[in-house]
Amino acid sequence: MAKLKCAWFDFACCEGCQVELTNYGEPFVQLLEHLEPVEFREVMSEKTTGPIDVAFIEGSFTREADRRRLEEIRARAKVVVAYGSCATSGGINALKNHMDDYAGEVYGADKDRPHLNSAKALPVSAAIKVDYEVRGCPMDRDELLRIVQQVVHGTAKVYVPSYPVCVECKRRETVCRYDDGEYCLGPIARAGCGAPCPADGIPCEACRGLAEQPNQEAMVKVLVDNGKLPQQRAENLSRMFTANFRGDA
């Protein structure tokens, strides 16, 4: 079987998912038995303008120039995989969608410089058709590997749970963060990661997006009443990675 020509592209992001991919070690080396990287900014200087089999896209879509570039990538690629929270939901970048003057707060006197001009942060799917999505910040290794296997072999899409992270914490017998006097977004967060953060004593921040039918209003109340957070902090935290979900942009 001929290797699939693959290219990795990045938009508005920290490129942490690309770095995470290079940290996979042996599993990534095994992928190279089936994939031929032709563009991957974090690990190689070569670039390509020709047709590709699979385009892996990291980062959110924030400008019309991004749309044009995404459309060009879509036209060249047989399969498009959006990976990481920024690419699949807008990620943390989408928090700026709720701020009137985010550029002024972040960049001060430089806020009007042309290269800082951008619109709302949106997922890649807001600009082009996406064939596969790998959620998470960074994306889940096993989920990404399963999707690559399916792309290589042309099999069905990966099942993505619709239930909340709390279910996975129960399965792991992880002590609830609220029982330890902390906060957590597990009740509204989409599962599928195996809930490693709460197991390591770190509150879930819903980097995989929302579970089905999340009650965000009740979540804010729980963050205030049980998590002991101020109202504004609770509201901001409840949409840390979910600012573009269910009309909340």
Image (cartoon, rainbow, N blue to C red):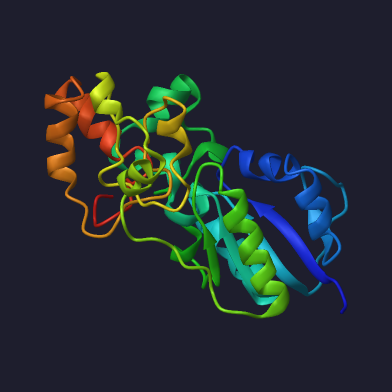
145 on left or right of 128: right
**Position of residue 52 measured from the top left corner of the image (x, y, whole percent):** 77, 72
Quarter placement of the N terminus: bottom right
The residue depicted at 55 percent of the width and 45 percent of the height is 12
Q: Residue at x 49, y 53 (%)?
A: 135
Q: Using the image as rendered, state which of residue 40 and residue 162 is in the foreground.
A: 162
Residue 25 location in percent, x, y? 78, 43
Q: Is residue 143 left or right of residue 165?
A: right
Quadrant assignment, res 4: bottom right
* Residue 184, quarter of the rendered image: top left
Q: Looking at this view, is 211 or 73 the one in front?
A: 211
Q: Classify 132 as above or below 61.
A: below
Identify the residue shown where x is 56% and y is 60%.
82
Residue 72 visible in the shown view: no
Lateral position of residue 9 relative to residue 133, left or right: right
Please say whether residue 103 is visible from this viewpoint.
yes
Which image quarter: residue 154? bottom right
The total number of labels drawn is 0
Q: Where does the image place residue 91, in percent across and percent down from the top left?
A: 44, 45
69 over 23 or under it: above or below: below
Q: Is 83 left, or right, of 197 in this rendering? A: right
Of residues 226 and 82, which is closer to you in this image? 226
Residue 156 position within the rendered picture, expressed as x and y whole percent measured from the top left: 56, 78
